[in-house]
Amino acid sequence: SFGQNSPLTIQMGENLALTLFSERRTIEAERLLCKLADISRRTHGHEHRTTKIVVSSLTLVRQHRNVISWLEDVSGLFHALRYENDGEVCVVQGPISSPRNVEEECQYAFSITDIIPSPGTPVICHGLQNSAHLNGKIGDVRNLDVKEKEDGSKYFDKDIDRCVVYFEDRSLAPVKVKATNLRVLFDLPKADDDY
């Protein structure tokens, strides 16, 4: 039968999770892959092919904690590693090339005012004044709302432009948030329906 423990069902769930991930719904993808990995480990064991595939996909999704920097001396896409100095500095590795070559990347410490969470990155709202009820809420950056500038160019201006955040709590509407009011969420908190 094709119940939730079936390798075919688990593989279909993994495909769904990767589709969610490609749509920048990283939190949903990670939560689904965690459940699938747990089911596959319990049912089929750690060495089963299906378990290994799901765990590999989970590792890929968990690594998507990226930020963008447009500093003159160092710009591009970077992998966020951690925060330091009470969250005022983000330690990153990069810039990320395609295909990625980690050996050529360097670590940098960027002020939070010099980075923008990239689309698909899980974030937590922080330091909001007018929408203080959203502080501590988690979601994914789905898009960057970049306005065309007077000279016709389009670039992210941290004082004007915003990150579009869709919250895990679906009762909350998506909002446009300043990048400085977002922190990369490195570890998802346990969900209410996790077992």
Image: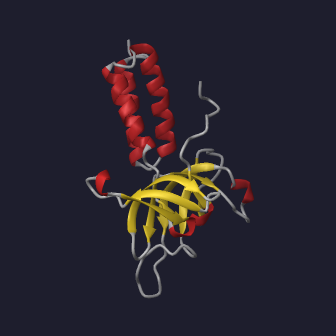
- Tell whether 51 sits left or right of 114: left
In the displayed structure, would residue 17 be above or below residue 178?
above
Query: Is residue 161 something that shows in the picture?
Result: yes
Quarter residue 194 falls in: top right
Q: Which part of the image, by quadrant, shows the C terminus? A: top right
In the displayed structure, would residue 139 be above or below residue 70?
above
Q: Which part of the image, by quadrant, shows the N terminus? A: top left
- Image point 46% across, 16% down: which residue? 42
- Image point 32% across, 51% down: which residue? 102
- Tell whether 133 sits left or right of 24: right
Q: Where is residue 95 in the image (x, y as percent from the top left)?
A: 36, 61
- Image point 44% across, 50% down: which residue? 24
In the displayed structure, would residue 22 be above or below residue 73?
above
Q: Where is residue 116 in the image (x, y as percent from the top left)?
A: 50, 64
Q: Residue at the bottom extreme?
A: 151
Q: Where is residue 138 in the image (x, y as percent from the top left)?
A: 61, 48
Question: In front here: 123 or 71?
Answer: 71
Quarter residue 74 falls in: bottom left
